[in-house]
Image (spheres, coloured by chain):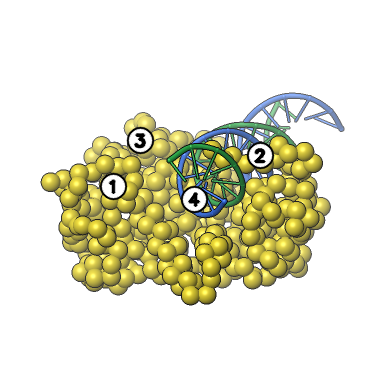
Chain colours: A yellow, B blue, C green
Amino acid sequence: MGRSPCCDKVNLKKGPWTVEEDQKLLAYVEKHGHGSWRALPAKAGLQRCGKSCRLRWTNYLRPDIKRGEFSPQEEKTIIQLHALLGNRWSAIASHLPKRTDNEIKNYWNTHLKKRLAKVGIDPCTLKATSNTLSSADGRPRSAANLSHMAQWESARLEAEARLARESKLRAASGSMNLQQQQQQMRSSSLGEPISSPCLDVLRERKNTPGENVDLESPTSTLSFPENRPPTTESGTGLVDGDVAVAPASQQGSENSEPEGAEWRFSGNDTTDCLTGFSVEAFDGEAPWLSEPYASQAGCSWGQFGAGFTGMLLGEFGEQKTRDHSRDSHTNGHETCADEEEEEGEENRNYWNSILNWVNSPSSSSSPVSYNPD
DNA sequence: AAGCCACTCAACCGCGTCATC
DNA sequence: CGATGACGCGGTTGAGTGGCT
């Protein structure tokens, strides 16, 4: 329905972007904002389709992108969120504010998935596919107990996005017409500072000491400094106004829970602000979208929403020092077998710790239990 | 030095969804 | 209310690159 003809049109360039094209796109977006992606290429003097421009911008040229190796914390975040959300890369990326969905997707497919498989974990279910892994208490691995968490988090993400849009609309309604408001929503959903110094991206790259500036690279591969100020406040990627939301069924999703159903938190972890919080059946507006419920839960409005994700991303036990699979081959005295065994052991410990966390009673005995009436 | 192979990741493709007419 | 346009998302592709023989 309504598919755009895109690059099938004649005279539209495809393939790697040149530096000149990057500069044109950056200059245009900095000056005018992207506006309609469809119309942008002509206005910016680019022989590209709008789709290609949008992709280049969102995945590469945006100034608020962090590039380079993923940190252990980021890896954990990806693994945990993937266990909950599956291949919803944009949702996962929303928790890693300086990473793009494309980058995360690539990293998962080329690194994390393989490493999981290598140590005997099914990347999709986080179940052990062999006896390579065992939990501390010997309980069988199961991803089933993630289902409620997944439902919960999924619904929360949807409501997050919706509320963000609505609040922006409300804030802007005084001074903008609808078209302008929508435009702003689109821009803000990309996290793009309209008036940001986009061209500095290229300049910074050029001026970075020690950077191998190869602007002639056929793919116009630019790397950006990693120390830009974050656009959101925490490592979770959650921002002020984060909220907890209803079960997916009550957000109008495809899930069909019985009406009047009740979600109840049953976790015992007192560090989690969701603990002991009970959401009763409701009519009309979802009550958990209102601040009193956050108060009832004994936490601030910001904490309230961030609680679950915070639990996901912040309460994880031991820190993995680093994935040594990429940098462990430095000791020439060790035999390959020794190295592999050591590496395998570290990997097993790493994944064991993740699975232990995922399946531990305090975290995964579902912060939300479902009581259909 | 040359050929082969595996890996990475930027970019493309096609579909779904939403807004507008 | 259906048709159309535009955008976003996830899956896939293929050029570039480095390691090995």
Residue type, numbered disc 3: Ala
- The crowding category of the residue bearing disc 1, from other C-alpha atoms within 10 Å (few below 14, some 14 to 19, many at least 20), is some
Residue located beneath label 4 in the image: A90
* Res. A7 image quadrant: top right
CA gap, disc 3 and disc 1: 31 Å
User: Helix or strand or loop: what does disc 4 sit on?
Assistant: helix
CA gap, disc 4 and disc 2: 24 Å
Residue located beneath label 2 in the image: A5
Q: Nearer the viewer, residue A257 or A170?
A: A170
* Res. A22 image quadrant: bottom right
Image-based side of A309 in relation to A19, left or right: left
Measured as percent of width and height from the top left, residue A283 is found at: 21, 57
CA gap, disc 1 and disc 4: 21 Å
Which marked residue is nearer to the observer: mark 2 or mark 1? Answer: 2
Residue type, numbered disc 2: Pro
Measured as percent of width and height from the top left, residue A94 is found at: 47, 56
Residue located beneath label 3 in the image: A128
Please report whichever mark, 1 or 4, sits nearer to the chain's N-terminal start. 4
Tell me what residue is drawn at x 12 percent, y 46 percent.
A373
Please report whichever mark, 3 or 1, sits nearer to the chain's N-terminal start. 3
Measured as percent of width and height from the top left, residue C12 is found at: 58, 32
User: Helix or strand or loop: what does disc 1 sit on?
Assistant: helix
